[in-house]
Amino acid sequence: MTKRVLRFAPSPTGYLHVGNIRTALFNYLEAKRVGAEFILRLDDTDQERSSQNFIDQIKRDLEWLGISWDRIEQQSLRMDRYWEVLTKLKDQNVVYECFETALELDLKRKKQQNQGLPPVYDRAALELSIEEKNVLRNKTDSHWRFLLSGETVTWKDKIVGEITVRTTSVSDPVLVKGNGQFLYTLASVIDDIDFGITDVVRGIDHLTNTAVQIEILKKLASPLPVFGHHSLIVDRCGENFSKRTGSLSIKSLKESGIEPGAIISKLVYLGTGDGVDVKNNIDELTPNFELGKFSTAPVRFDKEFLETLSRKLLSMTDINKVSDYLETIGVPDEIKEDFWIMAKDNINTKEDLADIWHLCKEGAKDPIIAPEDKQFIEVAISLIGPYPRENDSWQKLTTELNRLTGRTGKNLFMPLRNFLTGKSDGPDMKKLFPLIQKIQRYRSS
Ligand code: GLU
């Protein structure tokens, strides 16, 4: 049996966002499921738009999410190989040299649009004589297009099912630009052949590319990989995600304190109809993964989903996993566990822990005292002893206050919470109160 090899192939021209990660996960989890090799391929032939900064960030983001790769490949390091294959295609007369400038091509497209014709390249360059080409070569850089067969390309897609694309409705793709830049269309095919890629899983926006690439693969006498095209993620308004979707870049989600487990869990269940079984560890998601489960319709994605899951994950997190973080915000060892048990159900992100710890250490920044509660709070202060407190200090305080003031229920608890924390909601006071070290003294005005 041939060894299976999959790849995730981002272009380092921007930050990865949730849409890219969905593709990465599909490939990574499928590779894990079948014991295949998983390659991270950097599609960086566009030297102007690609940068080392984006490459570094892509690696950091993937590592943070737990997506690891067996091998890394970089297209910009393979240019000689691409020229070699282009020569092969030239020898077969399936590529042709073109000289139109971007402006000329644009004018052609506009003219076709005005005439109600599809904007397909008219193959004018095929009509040029050798002499005409020689003249043009002296004037301008030439680019190379692949000559599509005009036949119908069909394949059995692992996600979408049977697909048919008529290549007459597609322009002959440019493979190399005038400045010598290889375009993804050819570079990707060459890489897929050379690296023995057996499965290509990518967004449904690549369907036409796939048809074109199947034609190129055939010209290069290569076996075809299996293709799977997943649906795209859309935002609240039904718009596709683009690299400009800044707030859903992995970098910014990380910065806003979203847990990586929330992101990968959500993306693995999105579009399956199954409820999210949130997991911290990517490898726990593998057993349930099945490409055939995913709907082919676009799937909606909202940051709020992640916040909810992130909260849930945090509340399930073991103290050992947050111990270092608690250390960095200054929680002493001996109360770490009590602090975590008290706080874990009341945080959106780990960063919220710092505020809760500040409250424990320094007391409420702005205690709230309604005029009608002033006297009640004075009585409470007189009863609150110095820190450290017993575990049942909250019950003792509230029982005593009830006895002295006759207050019960909300009337008893709310003014105390408002005064002690400066907020009307938050962690369970029974667990929080024993950890509050300072009580802001109430000064009557
Ligand atoms: N660089 C391409 C992209 O990000 C890769 C597509 C593919 O997987 O072939 O869309």
Image (tube, grey):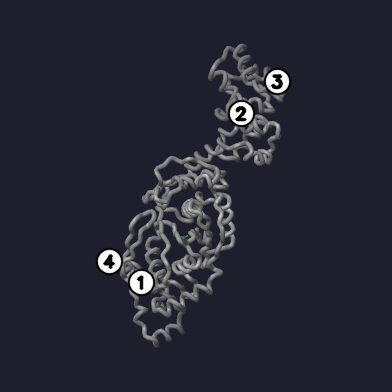
Which is more N-terminal, label 3 or label 1?
1
- Amino acid at dot 1: Leu
Front tag of 1 and 3: 1
Specify which label sits upstream in the sequence, 4 or 3.
4
The label number, if any, that marks residue 385 in the structure image: 3
> Disc 2 designates what residue?
421
Q: Earlier in the sequence, mark 2 or mark 1?
A: 1
Q: Tell me what residue is drawn at x 53 percent, y 59 percent.
A: 40
Residue 148, label in figure? 1
Q: CA distance from mark 1 to mark 3?
A: 85 Å
> SS at mark 4?
loop
**Label 4 crowding class (10 Å Cα cut-off): few <14, some 14-19, many 20+?**
few
Q: Position of residue 149 (x, y in %)?
A: 33, 72
**Residue 116, label in figure:** 4
Q: Residue at x 61, y 28 (%)?
A: 421
User: Please, what is the three-letter code of the amino acid marked with disc 4?
Assistant: Gly
Task: Name the one closer to the observer, 411 or 183.
Answer: 183
What span is colored magenta in the figure? Answer: 114-118
Are discs 1 and 3 less than 8 Å apart at CB?
no
